[in-house]
Amino acid sequence: MSLCIAKSLAMKYGGKLLIRSYTLSPKEIESLMDMCGLVEDILLSPNRRSSPKKFEKYITAHNLTSKHLYILASENRLQDLKLKEEFLVVDTFELIPADFKEVIREHVNNVWLRRKLSITTFYNFHVSTLREHPELFNIYDYIVVLRPHIHIGKPCIKITIVCAERFMPPSELTVCYDELKGKYILAPK
């Protein structure tokens, strides 16, 4: 979902989009980006979708077993400083084979650097991390929680958006895969 939101924003405003993954290959990422139709329908006007602004796409796929945490974090910071992307999607860091406190320290350093560089960043986490370490999520502007959901007997995804720094009630929507149309659609309320 974060990949689709970032792609739609890049299509709307232009600029550079960097996708950094620790779990997927560039080919798998491209395949996921091809399935972003619903999010594009929601975020883009029909004329912007048919003629998006020019944006450049970059994909970095890391092999977690070949690099130490500090080398990986330094390479990520260097890439952000060099590329100066407008939009970034980062895969879950829970999979990095290192001490969790060290991973968090490097992650927070990267978050602050990206804020300083005005990079709109989407971080992906498992819901268990949100439950076990809620204090980590105070540094984010918005949190989007995706949960599996059954709607009228169909498998769906319930999306909850929470604003971390402003006290707003969470907003929710549900998307389901329509087998006849071959794409995700908004579930009726």
Image (cartoon, rainbow, N blue to C red):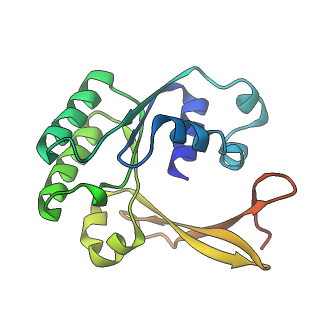
Horizontal side, residue 68 vs residue 39: left or right = left
Estimate the x, y position of residue 40 in percent, counting from the top left.
Answer: 68, 42
Q: Look at 60% across and 32% down and name the residue there.
A: 12
Horizontal side, residue 52 vs residue 160: left or right = right
Residue 59 in which image quadrant = top left
Horizontal side, residue 43 vs residue 178: left or right = left
| Viewer-side residue, 26 vs 81 | 26
| Viewer-side residue, 29 vs 58 | 29
Q: Look at 17% across and 63% down and name the residue there.
A: 100
Estimate the x, y position of residue 101 in percent, counting from the top left.
Answer: 13, 63
Q: Residue furthest right?
A: 180
Q: Residue furthest front?
A: 65
Residue 30 in which image quadrant = top right
Residue 20 in which image quadrant = top left
Q: From the viewer's perspective, is residue 4 above or below residue 118?
A: below
Q: Look at 37% across and 74% down and name the residue there.
A: 128
Q: Quadrant of the C terminus?
A: bottom right
Estimate the x, y position of residue 43 in percent, counting from the top left.
Answer: 65, 44
Horizontal side, residue 59 vs residue 182: left or right = left
* Number of numbered discs: 0
| Viewer-side residue, 15 vs 165 | 15
Q: From the viewer's perspective, is residue 112 above or below residue 189?
A: above
| Viewer-side residue, 165 vs 31 | 31
Estimate the x, y position of residue 92 in percent, counting from the top left.
Answer: 36, 55
Q: From the viewer's perspective, is residue 160 above or below residue 38?
A: below
